[in-house]
Amino acid sequence: MIAIDPVEEVTHGESDGLRVHCHDEHVLRLRQELLEVLRRGRRIPVRRFQQPYRFDTECGFRRLQTSYFHGPATSVVEEMRNLVAYDCTMKALSYALILPVAFVVVSAAQERAGGPPPQAATAPLVKEGATVKLAPHSYAIPDDNAVLVPNVGIVVGSRATLVIDPGMGRRNGEAVLREAQKLRNNAEMYVATTHYHVEHTLGYLGLPNARYVNSKTQEAEFAEEWQRQARLFASRGPAFAELLNTANGRTADVTFDREHTLDLGGVTVRMIVVGPTHTRGDTIFFVEGDSVLYAGDVVMNESFVAANESSSMKAWLAAYDLLEMMGPKAIVPAHGKLGDGTLIPTNRAFMRQIQERAHALKAQGRSVDEVADIVQKEMRARYPTFARANGAAGAARAAFKEAS
């Protein structure tokens, strides 16, 4: 099957036996256009993939970070990333995509009408034995470029340990706990999350003795959305269902409004809500003394941020000003490569470019859809190696909304 492999929020649509999974709500409008292309069996030229991918003999392409199309599907596919060929009936497509340029024909006849959602063969698991030290008290477990696995943070003090974003489900939380036990020599543990999405939160089930610290905004978002997200991810296949079959919500032991300071003994962590950015409750964690920032989806490395129409460009740019004043030496994004303090001016630069261009286009009388399409294409050309190009479109929509 053809699907858009989600990294964050997922919306799901299906029609005539075709299923299309889209990342970010603003691409729902493009789903019907894509389905029309598929139903007509159009030939779609596939350009060379410019970033690494993995090939899975059972499921075809598990992840393609960036893909470019032209021809009849231009306006559709440029909004989308992570093209995945899942079904065994689509292996011919998978093999075709290995070529630098290939022509594929996809039609509804190749799909199983009314079939299940695309199945993922492997679960999104935090990698054990991969923990890296960033500073005297600060550590990270990199996501190894795996879909739906966060970069996990661990901060160790003399009195207590804090785990940030423990992954999806009890199994991941238990793996993170084992990694933390190798580093800690204290009795108390806390767990917290950069935002409410289930691949960041539900790992706390594997840390039942840790005190859960969360903002009131995140608590509300989680209560509204986690069950829908968990059901959706569980439907991706047995490996996901196994991770989530015992999932249940958990109420925070400590809640705060906008800011909270946690003293772990010899090291202090500031927790600050900076949303509405990727989500309303986006929270950053700054380890004072170590100068390490766990930024969630607010700051990314070689990637546009996952903005959407609910984001505030003003809030995002204000967050960059705040974070730059903190002077982080190491930054741990929600996903992807770790980085240093230069990620903040880099992120600010492309977000300002998006904001200014969106304002200018709106002043010319362009519609929000036109602005999103134009800005995404221009930003992709300016930053050709960046992932999440649809995030540029989402940021343009947010900027359009805020423009006077």
Image (cartoon, rainbow, N blue to C red):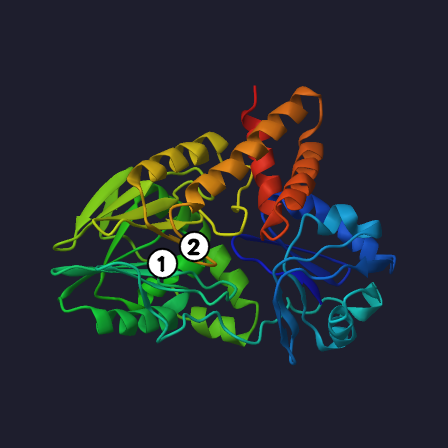
Which is in the foreground here, disc 1 or disc 2? 2
Which residue is located at x 32 percent, y 63 percent? Answer: 204
* Residue at disc 2, secondary structure: loop
Disc 2: which residue? 334
Which residue is located at x 65 percent, y 69 percent? Answer: 116
- Whether tag 1 and tag 2 are in contact, CB under 8 A, the answer is yes
Residue 373, can we see it?
A: yes
* Residue at disc 1, secondary structure: loop
**Looking at numbered disc 1 in the image, what kind of residue is underneath it?**
Asp
Residue 298, can we see it?
A: no
Residue 320 position, x and y percent, is: 40, 37
Tell me the tag on residue 165: 1
- State the CA–CA distance, disc 1 to disc 2: 8 Å
**Looking at numbered disc 2 in the image, what kind of residue is underneath it?**
Ala
Using residue 382 as the reference point, say whether residue 317 is left or right of it.
left
Check disc 2: other Cα within 10 Å, few if <14, some if 14-19, many if 20+.
many
Check disc 1: other Cα within 10 Å, few if <14, some if 14-19, many if 20+.
many
